[in-house]
Image (tube, rainbow, N blue to C red):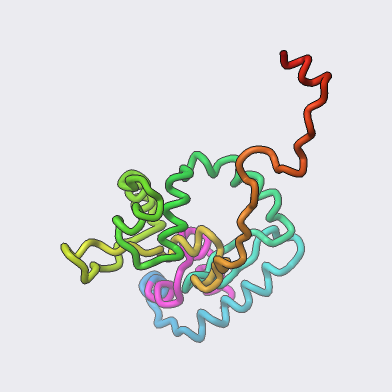
Amino acid sequence: MDVLKQHIEALIFVSPQPIAIADMRAALTEALQSEITDGDIWQAIAQLREQYQAPQYAFELVEIAGGFQFMTKGAYHRTVASYLRQTARRRLSQAALETLAIIAYKQPVTKSEIEAIRGVNCDYALQKLLDKELVAIVGRSEGPGRPLLYGTSEKFMDYLGIKHLNDLPKLQDFKEIENSVGQPLDTLEAPTSESIHREN
């Protein structure tokens, strides 16, 4: 079992996205020339999860997006988040983020529907999201011309660290900021004779 656990550990480590049990079984059966059962894999995964709960490890084995992946523990999220914030703008533009948010909450959605919400053309942003495999073509609309329908991919859930789309924040959780343009009214000071004199 220890040998199998190490092989599974290697598969999870090398996979760029969460790896499913079925994919592990196929790879292990071919590589080890032995019939590996789902039960064997689950048992090894349970041992790995327990192993990586030890405090000397900064990451843990989690079930996410239909598979398993190593992820950093909560104690290190601030450090990782700081790094990700510094690099996020190089990865996705504001337009791409807005387009991704619309797709996530409105899917399946057509390009014209996305553009109607954003008010601008989204060809470039949509292509970037497709290139990064954060969204995928999920079918065609029954409307005129049968335009393509877009939805989020499993990589999107991996990107956000969620198991299901139901884990996304609910829209009512977002509060609209009042007086978002300019300085809030309650912070404005009445002009004084001294300030008027300076301005003139």
Measured as percent of width and height from the top left, residue 193 is found at 82, 21
Give the quarter of the image for residue 23: bottom left
Q: Residue at x 53, y 71 (%)?
A: 163
Say whether residue 3 is visible: no
Q: Residue at x 49, y 39 (%)?
A: 90
- Identity of the residue furthest to the front in this view: 193
The front one of 42 and 81 is 81
Q: Residue at x 23, y 67 (%)?
A: 140
Of the 4 image quadrants, the one containing the C terminus is top right
Q: Residue at x 37, y 74 (%)?
A: 26
How many tags in the picture? Answer: 0
The front one of 8 and 88 is 88
Q: Is residue 40 left or right of residue 134?
A: right
Determine if the magenta segment contains residue 85.
Answer: no
Q: Is residue 85 left or right of residue 115?
A: right
Above or below, comparing residue 196 to residue 123 in the picture? above
Measured as percent of width and height from the top left, residue 161 is found at 56, 63
Q: Considering the whole magenta stretch, tell me its main secondary structure.
A: helix
Measured as percent of width and height from the top left, residue 112 is found at 29, 56
Say whether residue 66 is visible: yes
Determine if the magenta segment contains residue 13.
Answer: yes
What span is colored magenta in the figure?
Answer: 1-26
The front one of 95 and 152 is 95
